[in-house]
Amino acid sequence: MARSASKRVTRECDAVLALPFGPFGICLADERIEELCFLPPGTSLRPPRSELAHRTAAAIQAWLEDPASVEELPFSRRGTPFQQRVWHAICSIPAGETRTYGALAQELGSAARAVGQACGANPFPLLVPCHRVTAAAGIGGFANARGGWLIEAKRWLLAHEGRR
């Protein structure tokens, strides 16, 4: 799962990139990454408006070339302590591998539904690769969606990493 900014207005994004699975927004605040978000098909692109937006776009491109590539970037502190634990655990899932919501919940001493909700609240998808968390049977949801372009983005990401 990951956050979708379908309600976000493009003018709020400091960059909107054309990625293989669709438009992807970079939103900054106070020289930190506030949110990375999947945007609906047809969203207008926007070149990076700042040095940090450029660095973030470059890090995302590097990630697309090698999903094991992780650059240190200044993220805003977001989420509850539990969500942060889930996001940290997600970052330990190697590129090309997946974990189920249930397995991650067991590792964290929690419930699968709570892990799924934390995945859905992830403000930094791709760089906190929540697409690597799947249901016990099937790929599960993505960005709090069960179908449509967001699930297609998750399928693309999993297939992309599986080719590595």
Image: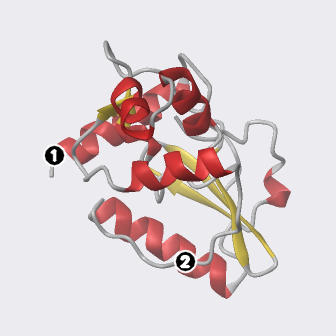
Residue at screen point 38% across, 70% down:
70
Q: Is residue 37 visible?
A: no
Kindly identify which residue carries mark 2: 73
- The image shows residue 144, relative to residue 74, as above or below, that is above
The percent coordinates of residue 109 (x first, y second) are 45, 34
The percent coordinates of residue 147 (x first, y second) are 53, 17
Residue at screen point 48% across, 26% down:
151
Kindly identify which residue carries mark 1: 163
Crowdedness near tag 2: few (<14), some (14–19) or many (≥20) residues, C-alpha within 10 Å: few
The percent coordinates of residue 85 (x first, y second) are 53, 51
Q: Classify mark 1: helix, strand or loop.
A: loop
Question: What amino acid is labelled 2 in the image?
Answer: Leu
Residue at screen point 52% across, 32% down:
115
Residue at screen point 66% across, 39% down:
4
Q: Is residue 69 visible?
A: yes
Q: CA distance from mark 1 to mark 2?
A: 26 Å
